[in-house]
Image: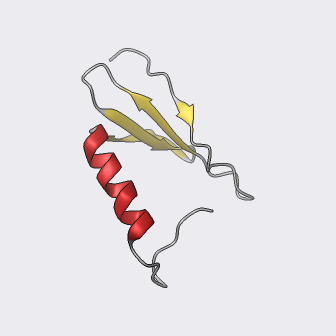
């Protein structure tokens, strides 16, 4: 697989230094990885990621759901 162009999320870099990275892949998917486990990558499509983000924005927070600021 060719080298991916990773970009750090603008919401990353809190006090713990945890960062989320995203990169477009040649097959049209988006790849996600965390700075503490860069070898593990999740693949998703833009519509799937958009649906997840919309759900997280509109779903009321619960005590067991932890999101980065």
Q: Quadrant of residue 24?
A: top left
Report the number of discs.
Answer: 0
- Residue drawn at x 30%, y 54% as measured from the top left: 51
Residue 46 position, x and y percent, is: 30, 39
Percent position (x, y) of residue 53? 39, 55
In the image shown, does 54 or 30 lie closer to the viewer?
Answer: 54
In the image, is 20 to the left or to the right of 25? right
Of the pair 1 and 12, the residue shown nearer to us: 12
Decide if residue 44 is on the left or right side of residue 57. left
Where is residue 12 drawn, in percent x and y? 63, 49
Q: Is residue 14 above or below residue 24?
A: below
Q: Position of residue 14 (x, y in %)?
A: 70, 56
Residue 52 lies left or right of residue 32; in this view the side is left
Residue 3 in sight in this render: yes
Q: Is residue 44 visible?
A: no
Q: State the quadrant of the C terminus.
A: bottom right
Question: What's the colour scheme?
Answer: secondary structure
Q: Quadrant of residue 31?
A: top left
Quadrant location of the N terminus in the rendered image:
top left
Residue lying furthest bottom:
63
Furthest residue in direction right, as rendered: 15
Image vertical order of residue 59 relative to residue 26, above or below: below
């Amino acid at each position: 697989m060719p080298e991916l162009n990773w970009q750090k999320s603008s919401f990353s870099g809190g006090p713990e230094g945890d960062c989320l990275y995203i990169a477009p892949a040649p097959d049209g998917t988006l790849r996600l990885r965390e700075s503490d486990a860069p070898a593990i990558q999740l693949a998703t499509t833009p519509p799937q990621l958009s649906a997840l983000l919309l759900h997280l924005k509109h779903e009321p927070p619960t005590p067991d759901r932890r999101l980065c600021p």
